[in-house]
Amino acid sequence: MLEKIRTTRRSAPRNLDSELRSEIRTTRRSASRNLDSKLHSEIRTTRRSASRNLDSKLRSEINPDEVYTTQEVQDFLKISTSTLKRWLKKGIIRANKVGGRYRILGKELLRLVSPRAERKAVNVYQQLKRGVKKTIEKW
């Protein structure tokens, strides 16, 4: 009996501490989640408004006779460095090397985003799709 009382006395503070700790943890987590959600929503709205402003500026800023750097092209097209390098190597974007760095004409950017380029890409995709269907039907 005496042993049981001793263990109860020892475990009571531990249980209380663990309960307090768990309550503190849940409070911290919920506060953190609320703060994170507020920050994320604020960041989203800021990004959206910045993106809208940038889009309107870019549409009016692409000059066909101007020469652009790779960084400017990445910003205009919203693509990564590796994608731009791949497009340059494949010839999707024509560019000139000046001093070991690529320079791209505004005409090339406009050609790339024109509706004609999109139609051409759709036609190539449709032809590829037909070819795959024919191959599958032969099996």
Image (spheres, rainbow, N blue to C red):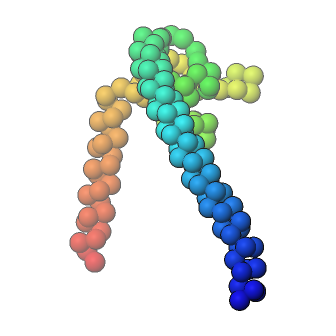
Q: Residue at x 45, y 13 (%)?
A: 57
The residue depicted at 62 percent of the width and 51 percent of the height is 24
Q: Which residue is rendered at x = 54% and y = 11% of the image?
A: 66
Q: Identify the residue shown where x is 57% and y is 43%.
A: 32
95 over 7 or under it: above or below: above
Up-down relation of residue 122 to residue 130 (above or below) = above
Q: Nearer the viewer, residue 87 or 22?
A: 22
Query: Can residue 11 be spotted in the picture?
Result: yes
Q: Is residue 90 visible?
A: no
Q: Quadrant of residue 137?
A: bottom left
Q: Nearer the viewer, residue 99 or 113?
A: 113
Q: How many marks do you count on the picture?
A: 0
Would you place residue 62 above or below residue 1 in this image? above
Classify residue 56 as left or right of residue 20.
Answer: left
In the rendering, at what x and y percent does residue 38 appear?
A: 49, 33
Most foreground residue, 94 or 60? 60
Residue 7 coordinates in the image, percent (x, y): 73, 80
Q: Which quarter of the figure has residue 99? A: top right
The x and y percentages for residue 138 are 25, 74
Where's the C terminus, which quadrant? bottom left
Q: Quadrant of the N terminus?
A: bottom right
Residue 44 x/y as whole percent: 46, 31
Toward the front, the furthest residue is: 2
Figure check: 62 above or below 13: above
